Image (cartoon, rainbow, N blue to C red):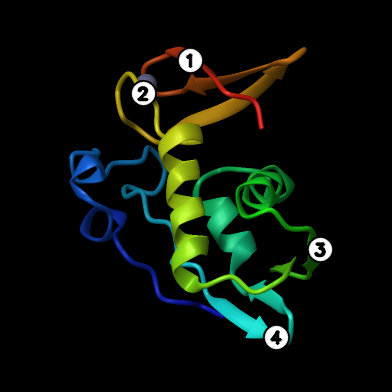
Amino acid sequence: MSGFKFDYESMLDEAYSRLPSKLKSTGRFEVPRPRVEAAGKRTIILNFKQIAEAMNRDEKELANYLVRELGTAPSFEGDNLVLQGRFSQQSVERAINTYIRDYVVCPVCKRPDTVLVKEKKFLFLVCQACGARSSVRPY
Ligand SMILES: [Zn+2]
């Protein structure tokens, strides 16, 4: 289950290629590539826990987003996220990349050292690198 890690900078389009690659603790901002497996009418993301951990997000928090983006229902099996329905590797990656862009990377300094803070009906992306507090669309 070590998975293979890849450098998001090399994979994402040029909008992302300008991201700084330093993350305070680990040195690089590396999110494992989702390992997507079809199982009948379900889709399993095998390394979901590692993906959530890499971006310092709660698994359920990230799952809620994916479910909304992909229009499905989730369940957890160990480290895996199981989605009802069939989803391609590409659509899972796209949803994860959108999440990183909108809910992980600080819009001010472009660093990924952030946390999501819920306040009443509002959601804020709080950056631990530059201190910016950005309002983001709740999901
Ligand atoms: Zn920042």
**Residue at the disc numbered 3:** 75
Q: Earlier in the sequence, mark 3 or mark 4?
A: 4
Q: Residues within 10 Å of mark 4 (few under 14, many from 20)?
A: few
Q: Earlier in the sequence, mark 1 or mark 2?
A: 2
Q: Is residue 79 above or below residue 67?
A: below
Left or right position of 26 against 15: right
Disc 2 to disc 4, C-alpha distance: 37 Å
- The residue tagged with tag 2: helix, strand or loop? loop
**Residue at the disc numbered 2:** 107
- Residue type at numbered disc 2: Pro
Residue positioned 62% across, 55% down in the render: 70
Disc 1 to disc 4, C-alpha distance: 39 Å
- Residue type at numbered disc 1: Ser
Left or right position of 4 against 13: right
Disc 1 to disc 3, C-alpha distance: 30 Å
**Residue at the disc numbered 1:** 134
- The residue tagged with tag 4: helix, strand or loop? strand
Q: Earlier in the sequence, mark 3 or mark 2?
A: 3
Indicate the position of residue 118 as horizontal and vertical percent values.
Answer: 70, 20
User: Which of pointers 3 and 4 indicates the residue nearer the eye?
Assistant: 4
Evaluate if marks 3 and 2 touch, with contact meaning CB atoms under 8 Å apart. Answer: no
Indicate the position of residue 62 as horizontal and vertical percent values.
Answer: 64, 47
Q: Nearer the viewer, residue 118 or 36?
A: 36
Asked if the residue at label 2 sits under 8 Å from ligand 1, the reply is yes
Q: Residues within 10 Å of mark 3 (few under 14, many from 20)?
A: few
- Residue type at numbered disc 4: Ala
Evaluate if marks 1 and 4 touch, with contact meaning CB atoms under 8 Å apart. Answer: no
Evaluate if marks 1 and 2 touch, with contact meaning CB atoms under 8 Å apart. Answer: yes
Asked if the residue at label 1 sits under 8 Å from ligand 1, the reply is no
Disc number at residue 39? 4
Disc 1 to disc 2, C-alpha distance: 7 Å
